[in-house]
Image: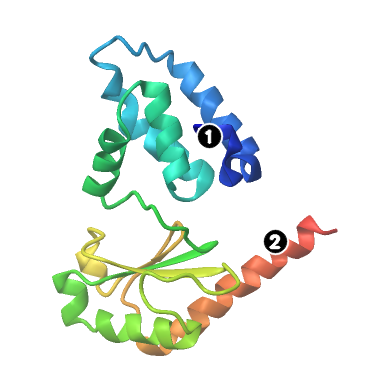
Amino acid sequence: MKKTLKHCESYQEHSKQFQELGEYLDSLQIDQRNPRRKDTLIMTLHRAQMIFGYLPEEVQLFIADRYGISHADVSGVISFYNFFTVTPKGKIQVNVCLGTACYVNGADQILAEFERILEIKAGQVSADGKFSIESLRCVGACGLAPVVTINSKVYGKVKVSQVREIIERFLTEDLEVEEVSHA
């Protein structure tokens, strides 16, 4: 018996996210016979990553099915663009730029300090799912080197001595949000 997507544990666990993605795909009115139907694929992958936080295989298969294309077509786009990820990320996503300007200004030491304090390596997620660390090649803010981005915030001219304070600021903000949502 062929296993369908609706039988996958991930689909059942994330049915609201799949429903949201399905509604988005419906709004695109994709005609599977149209050879230009892949014109909106990157936009769809961005939306899917925003909804799920990453692009697991089940999401890729769902998108491929709706576009009437192969899973290889979808995964090929994902692997080409480094913005897309197939691994889960933490709620607080730390990105340390290791581009030339950042590297010569000590970004490798900043990355090592984040790894030491959070007790995870680049490419990993903390056990509680709060933090993940990634190293990037360039964020395009060389005048602010070394640069760290955390979620949508950019930190420029970061020093190793500031890393703990930056982490604590995000933990404090996260606690404030949790307290408000439980009030």
Question: Which residue in the structure is indicated by mark 2?
Answer: 177
Q: Residue at x 46, y 68 (%)?
A: 132
Residue 138 placement, left or right of 8: left
Mark 2 or mark 1, which is nearer the start of the sequence? 1
- Tell me what residue is drawn at x 43 percent, y 84 percent: 162
Position in image of residue 144 (x %, y %):
26, 69
| Amino acid type for the residue under numbered disc 1 | Leu
Q: Is residue 7 visible?
A: yes
Q: Which secondary structure lies at badge 2?
A: helix
Residues at circles 1 and 2 in contact by the CB criterion of under 8 Å? no
**Residue 156, picture quadrant:** bottom left
Q: Depth check: give the residue in front, 62 or 78.
A: 62
The one of 132 and 152 positioned closer to us in this rendering: 132
Which residue appears at 61% of the width and 73% of the height?
Answer: 171
156 and 9: which is toward the camera: 9
Identify the residue at horizontal 52%, vertical 77% (top origin). 167
- Out of 45 and 148, give the one closest to the viewer: 45
Q: Quadrant of the C terminus?
A: bottom right
Pinpoint residue 53: horizontal percent, then vertical percent.
Answer: 49, 50
Tag shown at residue 5: 1
Q: Is residue 122 above or below residue 183?
A: below
Colour theme: rainbow
Numbered disc in front, either 1 or 2 = 1
Label 2 Cα crowd, 10 Å radius (few <14 / some 14-19 / many 20+): few
